[in-house]
Amino acid sequence: MYQSKNFSIRYILKRYVIMPVLQRRLLAQRFNKEEAEMNKLFCIIYRIICFVVLFNIALTVSVSAQTTRKCAIQTVNGNYLTAVNGGGIFGNGALHTDATKIDAWEQFKLIPLSNGKYAIQTIKGNYLTAVNGGGVFGLAAIHTDATKIDGWEVFTLQNLGGNIYAIQTMNGNYLTALNGGGIGGGEVTIHTDATKIDAWEKFRLIMLVSCQIYNVC
């Protein structure tokens, strides 16, 4: 009788006191473990979101810095390339190389394209065209009347160091400022048939920022 009563007390304590306490502890441990895992997951998600946001900001800044870089194009003799009438000319006399200072017609925009290539836009919004994609010697090697960018309006800027560049056409030829610049209308000023880079194929890109001139590109 005593043993049966003792057993009943132990059973009651185990069933209604000890087991609930153990269950609560197990539940608390499981909850704490799940909470820790959720916190860890939230930390990972937060870091991913921060990375994506910062990457997009950096990408936006990088792209916006490249979109419209206004510049003057200087020949080896120190003259500047001029888009006569600010652009819009088909045929002879589209470009001169005898300007000695930078005015409106000497200002161009470098429009970045894919694969590090550029279109060169005049002050009026037209684009420089290397007729036949390059390889032309004569008065009509360059036009300035294009209103959209096709193959002939695509150029590669080869960095030669010291802000000096060679301007390569679609066909792989280079722009040449005849005599190194200093030629006005009625004569050949630019041709596009050079196959290697010598002095006349070298141009300095002078970036124009906030109405000030910086020799940086």
Image (spheres, rainbow, N blue to C red):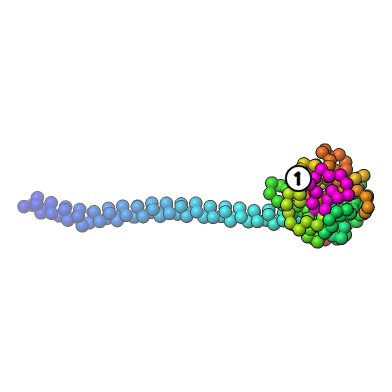
Is 177 situated above or below 101?
A: above
Q: Is residue 152 left or right of residue 22?
A: right
Q: Is residue 133 left or right of residue 58?
A: right
Q: Is residue 190 left or right of residue 151?
A: right
Quarter of the image for residue 50 reads bottom right
The outermost residue toward the left is: 1
State whether residue 97 appears in this view: yes
Instruction: Give the residue at x 61% y 53%.
Output: 55
Instruction: Give the residue at x 83% y 50%.
Output: 142
**Disc 1: which residue:** 170
Quarter of the image for residue 20 reads bottom left
Residue 130, position as x, y percentages in the image:
80, 49
Foreground residue among 43 and 119: 119
Q: Is residue 46 left or right of residue 28?
A: right
Residue 57, position as x, y percentages in the image:
63, 56
Q: Write the start and end of the magenta stretch as one range.
A: 128-143
Label 1 Cα neighbours within 10 Å, binned few <14 / some 14-19 / many ≥20: some
Amino acid type indicated by mark 1 = Met
Quarter of the image for residue 162 reads top right
Foreground residue among 108 and 206: 108
Q: Secondary structure at mark 1?
A: loop
- Judge whether residue 87 is colored magenta: no
